[in-house]
């Protein structure tokens, strides 16, 4: 028996009204996304544009978005004005070791909080979370005195070693992800004679790649852009990182806008490239670790 099509005029009007409402919501969403996209991408376009302008054009008023003549000499002058290659290498060394230390320490501690039962585990985890509420300015002076006693000031050690002792936020993020891994997998491995470390390295870590990549990206971004800690602990220019090196384009009375913008472009480019290639795992890690909004 064939169903008779709905021909009630009131139903048709209601259906059209709902369709128009959905279209209006969709257009409003697209317009809002377009507005925020332009708002966020405009400084990046301005940065690259200024890095390709002559020094006089960079400070012309009214300003222009695109240069009349694309001038690449600013990128060459960056390496002539300061030892930019050394700054880059210093930053790569500090960032690489910091990311490595963060992944090792945070994943081990997070696994303990997620899987290993022990007396007072929840209390210690609450204490760990409470440390995130502590402003970094509170521990700045005691930490500096400790590193000064160890004669680590003006070395990379104060920038790298703390990463091997864990980060509360990353431990929390990884713990949330580890708890989503089925316990049956570890129980089956235990029956086969697998140890705790075996279960951690052979089961948990391979299944936690999105969360680990998320931690690596965030740690990479925070360390690469860190200005305060290198400013506190590094004195000699040969140990400067990129964040400190950028300040050398700024004099007391002058500002080299073209070379500074060219240097800034080269500083942020690795961040853009890393995020572009790892954004899939980054979004997946955030979505599956329970910290999404």
Image (spheres, rainbow, N blue to C red):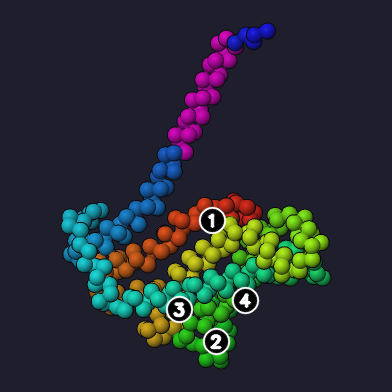
Which circle, 2 or 1, is nearer the viewer?
1
Q: Residues within 10 Å of mark 3 (few under 14, many from 20)?
A: many
- Asked if residue 247 shows in the view, the reply is no
- Asked if residue 184 shows in the view, the reply is yes
253 left or right of 242 in image: left
Which secondary structure class fits the magenta region best? helix
Q: Which residue is mark 3?
A: 230
The residue sitting at 64% across, 67% down in the picture is 107
From what the image shows, is residue 253 above or below residue 182? below
Q: Residues within 10 Å of mark 2 (few under 14, many from 20)?
A: some
Question: Which mark is first along the chain, 4 or 3?
Answer: 4
Query: Label 4 to label 2, Cα distance in Å?
Result: 15 Å
Which circle, 3 or 4, is nearer the viewer?
4
The residue sitting at 46% across, 86% down in the picture is 154
Question: Which mark is first along the chain, 1 or 2?
Answer: 2
Query: Residue 8 in the image: x percent, y percent?
Result: 58, 10
Q: Which residue is mark 4?
A: 165
Q: Is residue 23 magenta?
A: yes
Query: Label 1 to label 4, Cα distance in Å?
Result: 23 Å
222 left or right of 125 in image: left
The residue sitting at 38% across, 50% down in the picture is 39
Q: Secondary structure at mark 3?
A: helix
Residue 147, label in figure: 2
Q: Where on the picture, by quarter, is residue 163?
A: bottom right
Are the residues tagged 2 and 1 within 8 Å (C-beta)?
no
Q: Is residue 268 magenta?
A: no
Query: Label 3 to label 2, Cα distance in Å?
Result: 13 Å
Q: Secondary structure at mark 2?
A: helix
Which circle, 1 or 3, is nearer the viewer?
1
Query: Residue 29 in the image: x percent, y percent?
Result: 47, 38
């Amino acid at each position: 028996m064939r169903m008779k099509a709905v021909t009630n005029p009131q139903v048709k009007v209601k259906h059209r009204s709902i369709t128009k409402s959905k279209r209006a919501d969709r257009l409003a969403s697209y317009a809002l996304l377009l507005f925020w996209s332009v708002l966020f991408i405009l400084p990046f376009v301005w940065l690259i544009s200024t890095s390709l302008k002559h020094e006089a054009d960079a400070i012309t008023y009214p300003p222009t978005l695109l240069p009349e003549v694309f001038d690449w000499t600013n990128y060459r002058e960056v390496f002539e004005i300061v030892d930019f290659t050394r700054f880059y290498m210093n930053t790569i060394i500090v960032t690489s070791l910091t990311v490595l230390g963060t992944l090792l320490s945070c994943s081990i501690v997070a696994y303990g909080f997620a899987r290993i039962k022990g007396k007072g585990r929840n209390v210690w985890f609450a204490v760990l979370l409470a440390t995130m509420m502590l402003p970094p300015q509170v521990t700045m002076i005691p930490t500096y005195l400790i590193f000064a006693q160890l004669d680590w000031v003006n070395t990379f050690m104060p920038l790298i070693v703390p990463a091997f002792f864990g980060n509360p936020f990353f431990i929390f993020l990884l713990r949330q992800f580890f708890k989503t891994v089925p316990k049956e997998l570890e129980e089956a491995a235990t029956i086969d004679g697998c140890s705790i470390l075996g279960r951690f390295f052979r089961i948990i870590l391979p299944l936690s790649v999105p969360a680990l990549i998320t931690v690596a990206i965030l740690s990479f971004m925070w360390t690469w852009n860190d200005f305060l800690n290198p400013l506190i602990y590094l004195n000699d220019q040969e140990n400067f990182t990129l964040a400190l090196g950028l300040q050398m384009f700024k004099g007391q009375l002058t500002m080299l806008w073209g070379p500074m913008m060219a240097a800034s472009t080269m500083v942020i480019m690795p961040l853009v490239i890393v995020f572009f290639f790892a954004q899939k795992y980054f979004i997946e890690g955030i979505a599956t670790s329970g910290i999404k909004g």
